[in-house]
Amino acid sequence: MSTYATTNPATGRTEREFPSIADTQVDTVIGRSAAAFDSWRSVSPDERAAALRRTADIYAERSDELAVAITTEMGKPRAESVAEVELAASIYRWYADHGPDLLADETLDPQGAEESIVQTAPIGPLVGVMPWNYPYYQVARFVAPNLMAGNTIILKHASICAASSALMADALHDAGVPGDAYINVYASSDQVADMIADPRVRGVSLTGSEKAGSAVAEVAARNLKKAVLELGGSDPFIVLDTDDVASVARTAATARLSNTGQACNSPKRFIVASEHYDQFVDAVVAEFESVTIGDPAADDTDLGPLSSVEARDTVIDQVRGAVEQGATLHTGGTAIEGDGAFMRPAVLTGITAEMDVYGEEVFGPVAMIYRAESVDDAVRLANDVDFGLSGSVWSPDLDRARAVADRLEVGMAYVNEHGTTLPGLPFGGVKRSGFGRELGRWGMGEFVNAKLRRTAAE
């Protein structure tokens, strides 16, 4: 039985299976990608940009089909699926608009020579290992800048996203990207390791768990390959002060429950000034208890299932463990009876550093709320984890909020918003949240050769 399958997490039924590649096909896939690199790198930047622009257009034209696929595969509510398709399209379009300029030669101070120029050149075939929680968006973050740069792509998506990964390949190929410049593969982890180790492959990008990132980074390092890793997060959401606790709590709850809480940069730890703490807890509990949970394809659904029963049960076990260790559960945290991977969203307080959940990533609809006795206490709590993806600070006093944001040990710090992602903004983290950057000009700079060409003075 293939490990690639569409199993609807709202019903628990497996609707379609996909054949994985055989071990004997790995070498052929790499060879195809390497051969395509020789021709794709020679295509002008303007032509490559035109293919990305057509990809964006195709995403818009096929929005319904693309949205239905991920709603079915991983349970994303319909409106969120449509929004993700639009976001992915905007990334392809941004690189189509800005890519040629980002690849232009840079003239340096000659420093005693006739000229000193830095050229931006592609490095070769790349392997992308992508997760299930944002199937289109996370692929676009990796694929758009690297196809624009002239690299070729071997894309291994999560096993539950086989249908959407095929649709993505179709869109790129229909837009004019050669079939071997972007190859979608249904491969195993061992086969991916073999690809990374092959000398024809020049780099790897992974978005996923710490465990997967460690495994990929180890193989890449052993074979002297460039790697970009976007891993987990336990983002702090710091409420310093506010004139409207209910409004901030509503924003917090909406952000935490987006994608059923299954986002690396979701705000997972809410650190609230003592004077607002009790009212904030009550407001978040009320918001969590008011959401409509159900079929993600239905228009009135706020919260769909988790990606699988296994994923749901892992989150429920984390909540149960926290309570057993002394945390207070205010609402939710239990499975909903019947088919599918549904659970009631949970709110936890009273979490201490001795509890397992204090330092873990909770990848589901769970809000952990902490009381902060001072600004320094809030910053201490925010930084006292091994993750460092993003964080946000909330206050009408912008100077005060910015000062706190500057103290956060994260790759992305926000003031009065959380998790904003736009094609021109860098995305990535520090500490155990990974390394490297995606999106914007930073995403274009990870897998290229910044090549110096210097001509001596006569």
Image (tube, rainbow, N blue to C red):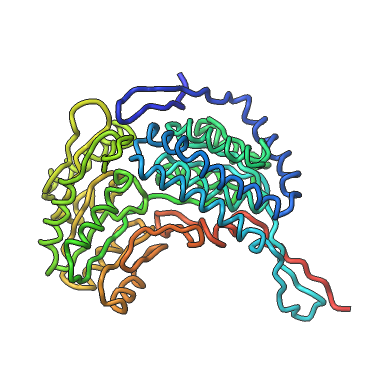
Quarter residue 175 falls in: top right
Q: Of residues 291 and 327, which is closer to you in this image?
A: 291
Quadrant in which residue 297 is drawn: top left
The correct choice, above or below, for 245 with respect to 328 in the image is below
Which quarter of the image is occupied by the N terminus? top left
229 horizontally vs 225: left or right:
left
Q: Position of residue 239 (x, y in %)?
A: 22, 66
Residue 201: give x, y in percent of width and height: 64, 43
Q: Which residue is rendered at x = 18% and y = 73% of the image? A: 374
Q: Residue at x 74, y 69 (%)?
A: 117
Q: How many marks?
A: 0
In the picture provided, is 450 more to the left or to the right than 382?
right
- Can residue 224 be seen at all in this image of the molecule? no
Q: Is residue 400 above or below residue 16?
A: below
x, y percent for residue 228? 52, 52
* Nearer-the-camera pick, 283 or 359: 283
Left or right: 444 in relation to 230: right
Above or below for 135 versus 443: above
User: Which percent across, then down, holds residue 342?
Assistant: 24, 34
The residue shown at (78%, 70%) is: 454
Out of 117 and 161, give the one closest to the viewer.
161
Image quarter where the C terminus lies is bottom right
The residue sitting at 44% across, 41% down in the picture is: 131
**Residue occupying the far right of the picture:** 458
